[in-house]
């Protein structure tokens, strides 16, 4: 068996093993790409007209719990000027909800059950195939890893042997028979989308696998480690602390607004234990997740335990912070999202066209054999 034949066999069987998962993950990723733009167009409660200072998070919590007393608060998001804040809640049955609250008036604008939200379902389809997360991640992760290998083997198979074949390798012969057109759609489009698909696949895997994040961080930092960036501070549980006069979550909020002035978006986790620090994030731009300052607070006193501003982070930490924006194309704005959308859509087409290539070869009608007659017959 030649090397190219071995690569073709590997490409074929890996594709048959992972094709359906890759199709679903890629297509759902394409649908999810413009979720913020679609939501803003069809969900008017996400946008508000108010201006001025925002209400403290305790007021927003109180509004949500007054309307939905059976739930507990998980975390809050301030999405920036002109946008409603969101209080994320959970119930005892494991349901997840979000209450959109006007951050300037404290009025609840909308209450949403995330189990029935279209884009939340698309996100879970993309990440877990709507299976339980513990099961779904063991299906999606290996399939995406296989897809990365298939991109490499696909490029090996696409690579033209002769200079005269290069033009054919870069163009689709639309006037040919449908089998040839389908083959070109698989081969030529696979080449054009390979770089974008590889970036999307690798950034997706970084969200799923800690070992890949650690490896990427280690390489980006030139072999150095920065434990303070990955390890939360440890609380001294023997230390006696006093509660502030104001609600402790408001103290988190005030310190983040003071130390990260002008930052548009805030994430605030609700305290869940007196023995674990509370995590908060300040994002420089609304609906962008790269440029961020990280905070750790004492859950009782509200004292700032550690601050990791964007400017002091290592290259590896910045890469991890940028990962979601790279995955969705957000890092380049609207143009990047269009590229990510098209890359995901074309990635979804590759398993389909590849299957048709395999099926066509498998069921190709045999040519009638010519009968050899003896000379002179």
Image (cartoon, grey):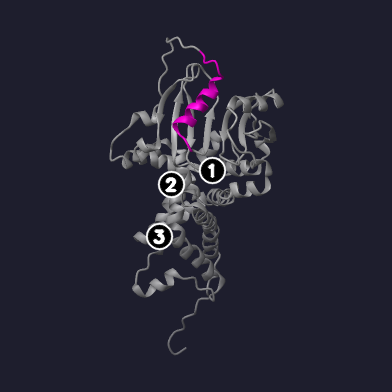
Mark nearer the N terminus (2 vs 1): 2
Q: Which one is in front, 30 or 132?
A: 30
Separation of marks 2 and 1 at Cα, in angstroms: 22 Å
- Closer to the camera: disc 2 or disc 1? 1
Residue at the disc numbered 2: 202
The residue at the point 48 percent across, 42 percent down is 141
SS state under label 3: helix
- Closer to the camera: disc 2 or disc 3? 2
SS state under label 1: loop
Q: Give above or below for 198 relative to 108.
A: below
Instruction: Name the spot of residue 22 as percent of width and height, x first.
Output: 52, 50
Q: Are marks 2 and 3 in contact (CB under 8 Å)?
A: no
Tell me: 303 left or right of 364.
left
Q: Residue furthest left?
A: 223
Q: Mark on residue 287?
A: 1
Separation of marks 3 and 1 at Cα, in angstroms: 35 Å
Instruction: Name the spot of residue 224 as percent of width and height, x first.
Output: 28, 35
Separation of marks 2 and 3 at Cα, in angstroms: 17 Å
Q: Which residues are magenta?
A: 243-262
Question: Predominant secondary structure in magenta?
Answer: helix
């Amino acid at each position: 068996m030649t090397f190219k034949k071995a690569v073709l066999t590997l490409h074929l069987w890996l594709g048959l093993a992972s094709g359906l998962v890759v199709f679903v993950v890629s297509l759902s990723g394409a649908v999810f790409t413009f979720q913020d733009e679609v939501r803003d167009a069809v969900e008017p409660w996400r946008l508000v007209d108010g201006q001025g200072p925002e209400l403290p998070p305790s007021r927003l919590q109180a509004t949500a719990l007054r309307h939905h007393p059976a739930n507990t608060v998980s975390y809050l998001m301030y999405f920036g000027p002109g946008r409603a804040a969101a209080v994320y809640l959970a119930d005892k049955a494991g349901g997840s909800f979000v209450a959109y609250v006007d951050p300037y008036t404290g009025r609840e604008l909308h209450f949403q059950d995330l189990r029935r939200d279209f884009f939340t379902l698309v996100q879970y389809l993309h990440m877990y195939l709507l299976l339980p997360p513990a099961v779904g991640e063991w299906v999606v992760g290996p399939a995406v890893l296989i897809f990365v290998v298939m991109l490499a083997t696909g490029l090996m198979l696409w690579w033209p042997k002769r200079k005269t074949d290069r033009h054919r390798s870069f163009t689709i012969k639309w006037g040919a028979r449908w089998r040839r057109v389908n083959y070109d759609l698989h081969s030529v489009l696979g080449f054009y989308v390979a770089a974008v698909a590889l970036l999307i696949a690798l950034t997706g895997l970084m969200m799923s696998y800690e070992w890949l994040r650690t490896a990427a961080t280690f390489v980006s930092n030139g072999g150095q480690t920065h434990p303070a960036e990955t390890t939360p501070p440890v609380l001294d549980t023997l230390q006696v602390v006093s509660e502030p006069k104001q609600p402790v979550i408001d103290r988190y909020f005030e310190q983040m607004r003071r130390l990260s002035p002008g930052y548009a978006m805030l994430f605030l986790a609700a305290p869940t234990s007196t023995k674990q620090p509370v995590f908060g994030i300040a994002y420089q731009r609304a609906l962008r997740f790269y440029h961020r300052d990280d905070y750790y607070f004492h859950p009782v006193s509200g004292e700032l335990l550690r601050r990791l501003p964007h400017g002091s982070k290592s290259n590896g930490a910045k890469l991890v912070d940028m990962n979601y924006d790279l995955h969705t194309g957000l890092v380049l704005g609207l143009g990047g999202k269009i590229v990510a959308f098209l890359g995901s859509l074309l990635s979804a087409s590759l398993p389909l066209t590849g299957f048709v290539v395999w099926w066509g070869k498998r069921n190709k009608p045999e040519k009638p054999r010519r009968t050899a007659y003896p000379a002179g017959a």
